[in-house]
Image: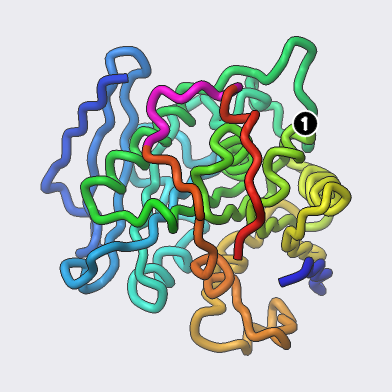
Amino acid sequence: MNLKQLIIGAAALAITATAHAVPNTSNAFQAIYSDVTLGSMPYTVFLPDNYASYQKLPVVLYLHGAGERGNNNYSPWAYNVDNLFAATKSAFPAIVIAPQAASGTQWAPINAGDNWGVGAYTNPPGGMLPITNNLQKAMNILDQVSSQYKGDAAKTYITGLSMGGYGTWDAIARFPTKFAAAAPLSGGGNLSSVPTIKDIPIWAYHGIGDGIVPDSGTINMVNALMAAGGSPEATYAGGKGHSGWDEFYQARYGTESFAWYNWDNSDGEFFYQWMFSQTNPVPEPTSMGLLAIGAMLFRRPGRK
């Protein structure tokens, strides 16, 4: 699929799994990741209907925004992503993992001090900033859950919004062979990483006129990827500003009549059909202990 620019109107891992079911959600469980060096992180795992009948399942790592930080193991999945969980529960069965970053912390190091307005950026002198503890913990959780719950390493995906959009761009730059596709929403990426990530299937979203994370954060990344020979997807939503995320996640899994999007479905692909059709030919067996800078040296052919 070629680029669509839609201008829309208006080290040691210890996991404590609990029997604590997520309210009103029979297909989910909560747990806490704990590491002697990295610290702890609460997370929720959503399993699809009829989970036991599958031999392998796609896995989606979801990174929340700044407003959902804390330790209640609730906020990451309670806002802005209802449609993501609805789609992966039955229409597109998948395991979804939603970790929670602590208050005052970030997924990407560029956002230290909640510096959301930086948008797209380049590496500082001296090389790439170190990976955050949050992102490393999230990657470790991803590996453990995928291993324990029949995750398909060749069909592992990442998406996130706002602070999580930054985190999504950062994750694929550090682990370029890990994800079969990525969907960063309303974030900003590392322009220095473009040669590394240009062949990763990416579908980015941003609301035009975003006053918190500038829309240039996505536009500049998409344009740089195209200039480097990549074929990213891009949805730019006019009048949405720093919002529109659950509408972006609004399935496109049942019908093409989503008036808000004025979606041109002439090629027959919706977002979820696009994402879950992507397969990683060189999946990484694990993210634990990988050196971020070393991962930046790897490049791979495009996928579909």
Can you give x and y, in whole percent of width and height, for residue 44 in the image? 31, 47
The C terminus appears in which quarter of the rendering? bottom right
Can you give x and y, in whole percent of width and height, for residue 267 in the image? 70, 84
Whether residue 72 appears in magenta in the rendering, the answer is no
Instruction: Give the labeled residue for mark 1.
Output: 192
Say whether residue 125 is left or right of residue 79. Answer: right
Front residue (pair 53, 167)? 53
Q: Is residue 160 above or below residue 25?
A: above
Front residue (pair 157, 8)? 157
Q: Dot 1: few (<14), some (14–19), or many (≥20) neighbours within 10 Å?
A: some
Q: Quadrant of residue 43?
A: top left
**Highlighted magenta segment, given as a residue range:** 286-293
Q: What's the residue at 48%, 31% (across, down)?
A: 135
Say whether residue 299 is left or right of residue 207. Answer: left
Whether residue 287 appears in magenta in the rendering, the answer is yes
Tell me which secondary structure the magenta stretch mostly adopts.
loop
Q: Quadrant of residue 12?
A: top left
Q: What's the residue at 66%, 56% (across, down)?
A: 302
Number of numbered callouts drawn: 1
